[in-house]
Image: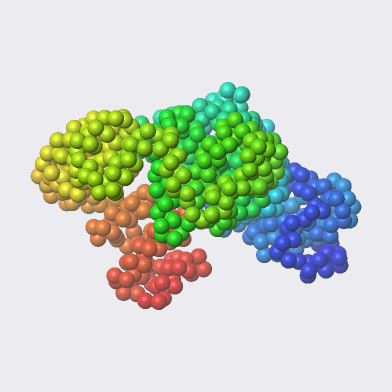
Amino acid sequence: MAKPAHIVPRWTFLLVLLMMVPGLAQQPAVDLVSAHILIAPDPMEETVTGQVTYQLQVSKPADTIVLDAHNMVFHRVALDGMPVAYRALPGKIAIAGTHIPGNHELQIEYTARPLQTVYFIGWKDDVVGNEQIWTQGQGKDTSHWVPVVDALSEKVEFDLSLQFDSNFSAIAGGLLAAKTEIGETSRWDYQGTAPMSSYLLAFAIGRFNFLEQQSASGVPLQLYYPEGEVHRAEYTYRYSSELFDFLEREIGYPFPWGVYRQVPVRDFLYAGMENAGATFFSDRYLVDSLGYNDENYITVNAHELAHQWFGNLVTETDASEHWLHEGFATFYAYQAERHLLGEDHIYWKLFDTARALETMDEAGRGESLLDPGASSLTFYEKGAWALFLLREEVGEAAFRQGVKNFLMAHAYSNARVEDFLKAVEDASGISLAGFRETWLEDTGFPAGPAMDYLKRHSPSVKAYLGLLEAQKAGNVVRESTIAEAWQQYNVPEYRAQLLSSFRVELTPAFLERVCREGSLPVQKAFLMTTKTLEDWMIPMVEGWLDAPSYELREASLFRLWVAVPDRRIKYLDRVSGNGSLSQKGIQQYWWILAALTEGYAGKGEKEAYLDSLRGTTSPAYSWETREKAFSILQEVGALNRENLRDLIEATEHHSWQFRKFARRLLDALLEQGPEAAFWRDLAEPFPRDRYRYVHQKIDSL
């Protein structure tokens, strides 16, 4: 990159700098129309060197142009090809503007050292092939790797070029216009297709291949997977093209981004993120045939795809309008799942969410959907419920037309809740004042109308609620009644609820019969509600060691190992021989059980099993694997010094879930001992400025 430009003093510019306030990023005189970004990430230095060129429209004289930019060094700033004065401020760059209205070009060359938003995964461990770089910019964080305006209202058409090692794939949204070899590196040029908010700009780098499909409307679908994992990709992306085709028809507006990519990444912060035209999601959804039956990608897949319209095409104005993003994405994901998996599946999911929302209300924590600080449960699930009831109130045809009109009116721009309600009112001729008050403004969850809705639409939910109401009224619900209800509807979720709620009324003969019928939800519910395995249960649970579910295999192994000590060796051999250990979670439990089983292995082998488990607390593994290892080792008192060092490192992990877990565990261990000197020695290699939490805790001992 070029050396820093000569700074041209301009007294008006300096005067404006003195008058600056944080809100100056809202610049009505300056419109960022398009941008071309070229970046070269350096994973060992954890930096991004880049150049961004903006095409601007200036409507009236603008003394300054202010962009959001965090932790950057600027090498050159030029307006219309001429170096201009600029000043780096906390989180921003202020650039001398122009008094000449019209079209202008702004170019910035810089190096960023992102403290968040860009994550360099696997570059400093001993595992070969797990290296990745990926971004997560929601809601105003893209400015940690490129100077942008973080405001949701600033819509820019972004082109993004990435230069990196040719042995990797570099992925972004937009059309791949060119890939050019430059020595040992390659340059990938992605061309934007439409304006978007900056938080939707993203890139991922890793060793990937992809499956290629095409939607019914001709949109290319590129489904990425890590090299060598094609067998998992086939299960992970099951129904992907069907989901796409359904949502495009159901929403009634063409997919807005030209091409759609999906990329699984390591240690992702969330289940998924709907970057424009390129969803990134957690690689825990990379599953095989057994994992598919435990936790698959269908719901996340549909949810993030729905966001391509609701959030990406039409964007909220601020957090008080967040229902327009999460409530709508959740609602349309439910519609897609209903199309694929049947109505009963969705109505029982809605039953569960209604119960969760009721519980929140009963605890005095109810929230309005217009509250910008509301929880995910409110925005996602109460938000989806609101749309189910709205569609029923105005009718399906008017609802569809209202949604379509809303999207057309606000495409590639911002909208408010009022804009959507008006679109539906105009399409239906019905006032939504009552709906707004009940579902959007009120902090309570309308449990009565929700349960009435389920009773109208789901016979199995209605039957279950009838049994609960009879029990609440003081009537005895006998096994004969449950047996009759069981046969009435062959719905796995319904039967699992019956077993969980009325377990005490059921005889061993009935339980054994229904559990042997093979429904995974029923079998899992049985184990969850069983405190102690009785003799008649043992043969049945032994059969579940080969179940088409890793979760059920793991739970069965643990329960049998506790209940039948004289068969522990048999159970361990069976699980090690049936392919279960290909799943890391079962392997971790197997290691500790093998190490604890008398007579299973010699001293050296037991130490090797324990060392294998201890090794999975390392940063080389996913945070989910690490958390499980820490939990098991703590439970058996087997954390060693290296595990404790890994725990200290985890207290500043970028995943907030894992970071919170690590800090709680560290707090518990500090209370138990050993003395402060031991912990100070462990923490000494960890810099105080980065590991403040740990050092403050140790200093307080």
Q: Nearer the viewer, residue 59 or 323?
A: 323
| Residue drawn 32% across the image and 52% down it | 629
| Residue drawn 85% across the image and 50% down it | 59
Q: Nearer the viewer, residue 666 or 254?
A: 254
Quadrant in the rendering for residue 503:
top left
Q: Is residue 269 left or right of residue 670?
A: right
Percent x, y of residue 283: 45, 41
Percent x, y of residue 697: 41, 72
Rendering colour mode? rainbow
The image shows residue 373, relative to residue 308, as above or below, that is: below
Q: Is residue 241 left or right of residue 537?
A: right
The image shows residue 213, relative to residue 674, as above or below, that is: above
Image quadrant where one finds the C terminus: bottom left
| Residue drawn 47% across the image and 29% down it | 339
| Residue drawn 78% across the image and 66% down it | 17
Percent x, y of residue 319: 61, 54
Percent x, y of residue 22: 70, 64
Q: How many marks?
A: 0
- Is residue 620 in view? no
Extreme-right residue of the structure = 100
Q: Nearer the viewer, residue 286 or 418?
A: 418
Quadrant in the rendering for residue 92:
bottom right
- Is residue 664 in view? yes
